[in-house]
Image (cartoon, rainbow, N blue to C red):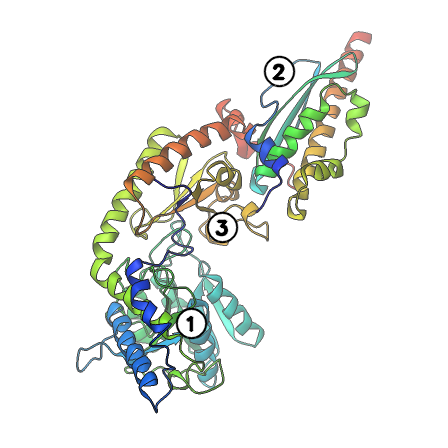
Amino acid sequence: MKLPIYMDYHATTPLDPRVLEAMLPYFTEKFGNAASRSHAFGWTAEEAVERSREEIARLIGANDERSGQPDGKSIVFTSGATESDNLAIKGVAEFYKEKGNHIVTTKVEHKAVLDTCKRLEKDGYEVTYLDVDRYGMVDPDAVAKAIGPKTLLVSVMLANNEVGTVQPIAEIGKITRAKGVLFHSDAVQGIGKVPFDVNAMHVDLASITAHKMYGPKGVGALFVRRSKPRVRLTAQMDGGGHERGLRSGTLNVPGIVGFAKAAEIMRLEGKAEAERLVRQRETLKKKLTARLPEVHLNGHPEQRLPGNLNLSFAYVEGEAMMMAIKDVAVSSGSACTSASLEPSYVLRAMGVGEEAAHSSIRFGLGRFTTDEEIDFVARLVIEKVEKLREMSPLWEMAREGIDLTQVEWAAH
Amino acid sequence: MAYSDKVIDHYENPRNVGTLDKNDENVGTGLVGAPACGDVMRLQIKVEEGKIVDAKFKTFGCGSAIASSSLATEWLKGKSVEEAEEIKNTAIVEELNLPPVKIHCSVLAEDAIKSAIADYRAKQASRKKAAAE
């Protein structure tokens, strides 16, 4: 077993060696510009791009309703999910501005969605940020209630990057379709890992990125529904009119080829991989909770990403914990790990107390996580939590039976 | 975040972790910070004939908070109470080479020292008062 161990698969994933293999020729001999229409170099690149579109469309069920075949034209390539989120939300808001000015989203979205919405608010749009329950789940009825005559778009993520909660996308899709409102989903974390089908779930726009599914960084896509309803967008990037005018810029051909290979692997192996990850995740959870008291799960117990285990270790601060297990790469909702010194907004939106937010650790398991690593991490975490609790005045006070909520703390 | 070697040393080998008897009249206890803010320090001093003969701490907080309190206990031992009062957070920042976002950890350590001394003095004052009566 090699150290350090990577358990931060929500942040990014390593490239699958098969993906790299597929990409390599497109850096060297097949280097053409997919927009070059007049020679073989361009045609080879364009062919690869078109095949890639179809492979990605297949993974998310973006099939043409009449032929039943994957509709590659519904895939717009971007630089990643942040750009896809911006293009979807700003693109809809601008294009349909005569029709309305209201967007519905949730408080636990990724910053690429939240900050895009905030920008639109400055430009005069209205945004409703829906609450979530204590598991981080949004209530479809709340979505229905929030939709008004001026609502253009609902944006709800497929799965949360911090706590792994999977949102009821199919239920929300039914509502938006019935009300004639467009539905965007930032599907970055969940694609290939939990069920996602844009037609079955009535999703009109979906953001995806390659590097969260063992593909390369710097390439993503936006699914844009082409019929029933046909979604129109205002482009956010001006230039050569690539991607049917929706996203100008020379296509990242090797990246796109890698993205498609990663999508193919996910389509073929994702289900078996998810089952293995659930087993490993539950093993890790059981090992930790069997030995350590007062360890709390953040997020939904079942409706969650297979590889996500987010735990709060009471009386131990998250950053200190990360230092203690420095041979394991994880992340924390603790304020001390963020530049803003604010604990995770996702945990706060779920009503998780600030103390618990400061004590949260996200273990992100993935394709290359081994059982041996799970055992090692469990042993290490148990040892370090016990050590840090011995150093924690809160742990001592709690052991003495002092109710910490009744202590008059001097907040600073 | 890249920490200095000194922070890592204090974090990995914290000095003087523990608990003194808070009911001992020669012990002063300072408990500062709040769980909601992500750091709580408890710093205790034991004073004999005006000199700090022992110091212990327990800290819930990040690496710099633990290192700041560990360093504080090291500095306190052997100092008179008056000398201890002069310890400034800036000295802790300098010694541990704390980055700007972690300066509040050193402030908390200074507060903990002051609070422990105040507790010790309050105990002494009430003892004198009891003796006089």
* Dot placed on the residue nearer the N-terminal end, 1 or 3: 1
Front one among A271 and B38: A271
Whole-percent x and y of residue A273?
Answer: 24, 53
**Same chain shared by disc 2 and disc 3:** no
Chain letter behind tag 2: B
- Compute the Cα span from label 1 to label 3: 26 Å
**Same chain shared by disc 1 and disc 3:** yes
**Same chain shared by disc 1 and disc 2:** no
Front one among A84 and B25: A84
Check disc 2: other Cα within 10 Å, few if <14, some if 14-19, many if 20+: few
Q: In this rendering, which labeled residue sits more in front, label 2 or label 3?
A: 2
Element on which disc 2 rests: loop
Front one among A37 and A277: A37
Whole-percent x and y of residue A5?
Answer: 39, 43
Indicate the amino acid at tag 3: Arg
What residue is shown with label 3? A348
**At x 70% / y 13%, what residue is drawn?**
B25
**At x 58% / y 36%, what residue is drawn?**
B8
Chain letter behind tag 1: A
Whole-percent x and y of residue B68?
Answer: 65, 34
Q: Residue furthest left?
A: A67
Residue A3 in sight in this render: yes
- For this view, does A161 lie left or right of residue A229? right
Residue B31 in sight in this render: no
What residue is shown with label 1? A84
